[in-house]
Amino acid sequence: MAALFKARRALGMVVGHGVRCLSQLAELPELHQMMRQTCRDYAQKELAPIAAQLDKDHRFPAKQVQELGAMGVMAVEVPESLGGAGMDYLAYCLAVEELSRGCASTGVIVSVNNSLYLGPILKFGTEEQKKQWITPFTTGEKVGCFALSEPGNGSDAGAASTLAQREGDEWVLNGTKAWITNCWDASATVVFATTDKSLKHKGISAFLVPMPHPGLSLGKKEDKLGIRASSTANIILEDCRIPLGNMLGERGMGFKIAMQTLDSGRLGIAAQALGIAQAALDCAADYAHKRTAFGAPIGKLQAIQFKLADMALATESARLLTWRAAMLRDAKKPFTKEAAMAKLAASEAATFVSHQAIQVLGGMGYVTDMPAERHYRDARITEIYEGTSEIQRLVIANNILKEYQQ
Amino acid sequence: MSARVLVGVKRVIDYAVKIRVKPDRTGVVTDGVKHSMNPFCEIAVEEAVKLKEKKLVKEVVAVSCGPQQVQETIRTALAMGADRGIHVEVSGKDYETLGPLQVSKILAALAKKEQADLIILGKQAIDDDCNQTGQMTAALLDWPQRSPEDGTFASEVNIEADKLKVVREIDGGLETIKINLPAVVTADLRLNTPRYATLPNIMKAKKKKIANVKPADLGVDVSSRLEVLKVDEPPQRQAGVKVETVHDLVGKLKEAGRI
């Protein structure tokens, strides 16, 4: 009797709207399929043809970002009342993957704006802050960035040494932030600074700073291996004064805000890595049909077939992990472990697949005539930013040990 | 301004797919092959939605004929801005033999039923390349029909005081044509650039209605007057021959009986 009841409930879950369950891993809901197709069409027609040139020129795709803003992609999860698309996180991950398949730099620009900038303000901001700092950043006209890392600490986020001192009705920020994606093109940033170093990570708070702003300057644009159309630089704060109302969340909440933001942000990066992996796989599989050697297309050779199989397997597995983590987040269930697994799997898949893609292309994979070399360069960073692969392993291990707590 | 526009949208094999002939040579392989909205139909939808944004028409209705899958195509039109959809159910053998004659009968019947003032269609479909449905529909309704393209650049389509005004570029400048409504317009490639559906519109599309009708309800007989005898691949392209001089070229052409 109890078993029948459970089965009926399970069926109800499958049939009901908006409830995420395993059956949806087999096929996405119609809404998500339409959305995915739109993003795929856009990426194929508008991003893929210019990606190589954007990479060469180190150029921010301003026009495309505006078009994506008009489509609602720059603020997928933001409610319509604030100017966003009002869709769920699974939709967002699908969007980032499809866009990254066309251009990985555009993918990270979209991801940073959505997850790292809009994300924390949506979750921790006051109504006033949301209106001021969210709505103008949904249209693609303005993008935001996230300033946590410093020259002295990346993984060790709790050791932030950027200072925030209260002087009258202002906060004064001093310090340097490093590796900030989007900063040369951004109009605002979420900055993490400590009000009391002795409290260690509990002394960190989050602040909203407009850009440009007196006391805030940018370091030189880093000359990166990959994702070159997205700008990365230091943010230097020298007596940067902001109103008291610019603190995000409560005093001392900064570390918690950062960690929770990164939990979601890493799904965006997982999606970006999936897009890169898929693009590399597309390139390799297409080449396997066309290139002939020993009298037949190389796709007939087992050596190539095994590679393609492993590449597809790595990508598909990481994709399912990403979707599952996104679905858990949408169902408001704990998803930290799953998000770390997704990011780890997807980024390692991206580097593996793009490496093998060059191998399949042989000499052609090494030159800029084919996109394989760009995918290889773009993939590498996914194992580093928003939590290195080593940190992801620590997060997963900690969660596992907690589950098995004696 | 109470005009209602009917837009026909056809589900076809995606333009990027490599077409394969079925082994029994009765048609092309469609199972498991990617399908999408006919590109000319996308342009038709875009034009209709633009007219609505200019407040020249009140309602845009997207129509498609075919099996269950054409609902995807109708939803895409809804996501681009159409207000509601009509799915004319045609499946199995009837769908395989469905052609411009039957579709134009269906569209004519729907135009009367829905009291449409304007029908916008793609000039042709990329699968059969017939370029007949627009003309046949107009003939059945006894409405004027115009392609704003007609092989040249169309700048805009407008509705002014119950007449359709079409401006197009010609060699000497701009030509403005006025035709009486109701009318049929067929859209060619250079009329506009179809928009990408925005995420909010995709969400709204889910709530828009798609009505189901059968051809019989409209009094239309969908049996075909044509029978496909066989379908073959185009002949393999033969290698050419290089010649040294114009004299040689003329000689070779004469040899081949071409001149």
Image (cartoon, coloured by chain):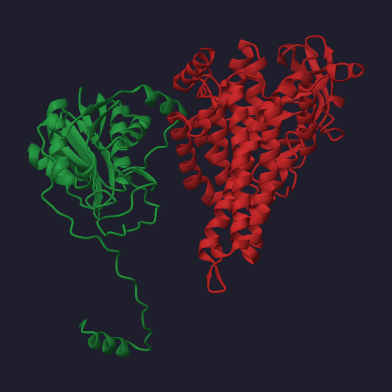
Rendering coords of residue B208 (x, y %): 33, 23
Side of B242 where B120 appears, left or right = left
Chain with colour red in the figure: A
> Which residue is more in the foreground, A25 or B186?
A25
Quarter-of-image position of residue A191: top right
Asked which quadrant contains residue A403, the reply is top right
**In this view of the protein, can residue A210 be seen by the observer?**
no
Asked if residue B100 is positioned above or below residue A327 in the image, the reply reads below
Q: Residue at x 26, y 55 (%)?
A: B27
Image height check: is A349 above or below A236?
A: below
- Residue A113 coordinates in the image, percent (x, y): 62, 30
**Residue A406 visible to the viewer:** yes
Residue at the outermost front position? A1
Q: Pick whichever, B236 or B45, lies toward us.
A: B236
Task: Answer above or below: position of A264 versus A95.
Answer: above
As rendered, which of B243 and A264 lies closer to the eye? A264
Q: Report the residue that reaches farthest toward the top.
A: A168
Output the letter for the chain in green: B
Query: Which residue is at the front of the view, B38 or A172?
Result: B38
Residue A363 coordinates in the image, percent (x, y): 65, 66
Task: Name the residue rendered at 76%, 42% in the picture.
Answer: A220
